[in-house]
């Protein structure tokens, strides 16, 4: 058993930019030589999140509209009143989806469905440089 | 330290069918002989999710109504317009709840509360055959 | 590779009490002497959840208001009708946010952002004594 940690650096556009990182994560899993175990994908920061989705333009549009519906950007958040950040909504979206995802690895590959991609969503209200920690653990 | 991976195959009814898999996961943990570590439960596919709940008929009804309230089945999703799938809502629900759950294992047992069960929710709009990957890691 | 499991005991006020446990988790990671791996934070019970947020009073207020908006306390849940518990909403919030969080550990520290804290939210409708399982795995 061993553990190998890598980082991805992403340049995002913010505003619920949805980024498919499946190929990069798969490449890191392959490069780790770990055949059997899991990979944890963790977003550094409090205004972005990690989950899976079928990555296609329709659902990218749909998830952005869903987020605006349940956590509207302009709804008078206390965070914005206190800090003048105007990104309270981004923090709430990030907390709801969560910063972390763990995917089993079998025979050196993630056990994802064919139409199941690993995505980072940057909920912040401006372009950001993002660190994603990719940790492979196993044997 | 070692890692053991199993699969569950589930026949679901779709339409937010809630399935309690606690006993099966507990059986796999026991069979692994791993006493101390954790178990990751991961759903293969992009229209189902994994979480915990008190599994009783009232809450099963409540979670289905909640999902229909926040992500209605018929709300005109771009995914449906593009692909004619009519299950855009199922993708969004799956992304929001997430496909993965990790539970610590102590003395060969999951550290769940008495009224805390591991569930798969199949959000898709038709019966499905589902693969659930159950991975136990530890010593 | 090794695994070390600890428990935190929290006294909460219920009613979506948000508790920052970052320092306690960091102390447990440090005490484990594990330098490279991850830590899983798991809440025992079905009416509380674990996630990350920028822990400041504005967002604490905002997340509580968000939860009341999307899953109102008094909305006539089947769970409440059956069991007389009046906390159906708390179960649903807990299932949506999820009970588990995994954070990578590098050089003995969690890879959290500066404004990214680990929180437990107790959604239940009364003060509770809570067990949080903190499991560090790695080398």
Image: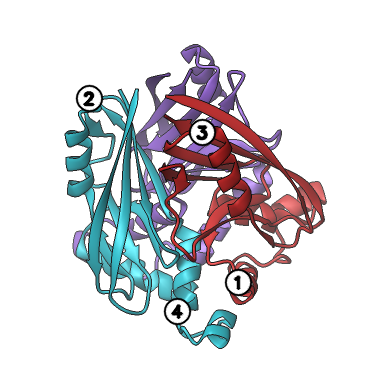
Chain colours: A cyan, B purple, C red
Q: Which mark is residue C33?
A: 3
User: Residue tagged by mark 4?
Assistant: A87
Q: Are marks 2 and 4 in contact (CB under 8 Å)?
A: no
User: Residue tagged by mark 1?
Assistant: C56
Q: Residues within 10 Å of mark 4 (few under 14, many from 20)?
A: many
Q: Is residue C29 visible?
A: yes
Q: Residues within 10 Å of mark 1 (few under 14, many from 20)?
A: some
User: Residue tagged by mark 2?
Assistant: A107
Asked if marks 4 and 3 fall on the same chain, the answer is no
Q: What residue is shown at x 48% (from left), y 48% (from top)?
A: B16
Which of the marked residues, 1 or 3, is nearer the chain's N terminus?
Answer: 3
Q: Quadrant of the C terminus of chain A?
A: top left
Q: Quadrant of residue A39?
A: top left
* C28 lies above or below B11: below
- Per the image, label 4 sits on a secondary structure element best described as loop
Q: Are marks 1 and 3 in contact (CB under 8 Å)?
A: no
Q: Position of residue A43 (x, y in %)?
A: 37, 56
Labels 4, 1: front one: 1
Chain letter of disc 4 in the image = A
Q: Are marks 3 and 2 in contact (CB under 8 Å)?
A: no
* B52 lies above or below C48: above
- Per the image, label 3 sits on a secondary structure element best described as loop
CA gap between label 1 and label 3 equals 30 Å
């Amino acid at each position: 058993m061993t553990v190998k940690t890598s980082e991805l650096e992403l340049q995002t556009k913010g505003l619920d930019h949805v980024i498919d990182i499946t190929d990069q994560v798969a490449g890191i899993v392959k490069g780790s030589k770990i055949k059997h175990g899991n990979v944890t994908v963790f977003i550094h920061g409090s205004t972005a999140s990690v989950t899976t989705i079928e990555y296609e333009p329709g659902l990218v549009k749909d998830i952005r509209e869903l987020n605006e519906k349940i956590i509207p950007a302009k709804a008078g958040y206390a965070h914005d009143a206190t800090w003048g950040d105007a990104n309270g909504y981004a923090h709430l979206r990030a907390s709801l989806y969560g910063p972390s995802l763990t995917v089993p690895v079998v025979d050196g590959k993630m056990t994802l469905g064919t139409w199941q991609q690993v995505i980072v969503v940057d909920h912040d209200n401006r372009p950001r440089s993002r660190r994603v920690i990719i940790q492979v653990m196993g044997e």
